[in-house]
Amino acid sequence: MKKPINKLKDNFLTKTGESLKMNQDEISRWSCLIEAVEFINKKGDQIGMDMNKGKWVKPIAIQKYIDERFDTMSEELEHEANNHPIDIYS
């Protein structure tokens, strides 16, 4: 039986070759942030917004999204880890 992801420390290589260890909570928070930025980018493209201009970043809204999505993301990552290995490339 595989260990739950929260018991594991997964290693990730950065572009500079540095090795980082992250636990489930860290991986879940980063995944939520990436998902939020992807969602913002998709919506910006849909409405024809130039993402290089203007102040589209709303830190409080992004933090709220991360807080609301965190538990579900953790469960999804744990489910994936139990069924399939996680491969995250930077």
Image (cartoon, rainbow, N blue to C red):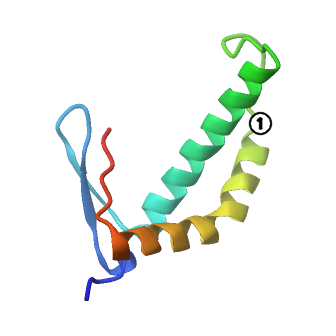
| Foreground pick, 45 / 66 | 45
Q: How many marks?
A: 1
Residue furthest to the bottom in view is 1
Give the percent coordinates (x, y) of residue 78: 44, 74
Quadrant holding the C terminus: top left
Residue furthest to the left in view is 17
| Foreground pick, 82 / 32 | 82
Give the percent coordinates (x, y) of residue 55: 77, 21
Q: Residue at x 54, y 43 (%)?
A: 34
Q: Is residue 44 above or below residue 79?
A: above
Q: Which residue is drawn at 33% across and 81% down?
A: 7
Residue furthest to the front in view is 83
Left or right placement of residue 4 versus residue 18 in this view: right
Give the percent coordinates (x, y) of residue 35: 59, 45
Q: Is residue 29 above or below residue 76?
A: above
Packing grade of label 1 (10 A; few <14, some 14-19, many >=20) is few
The image quarter in which residue 15 lies: top left
The image quarter in which residue 67 lies: bottom right
Judging by the rendered image, the residue that carries numbered circle 1 is 58
| Foreground pick, 72 / 18 | 72
Left or right placement of residue 19 versus residue 60 in this view: left
Q: Which residue is drawn at 36% across and 77% down?
A: 82
Tag 1, which secondary structure? loop
Quadrant holding the N terminus: bottom left
Left or right placement of residue 47 versus residue 13 in this view: right
Give the percent coordinates (x, y) of residue 58: 77, 36
Identity of the amino acid at label 1?
Answer: Lys
Q: In this view, does 24 lie above or below 6?
A: above
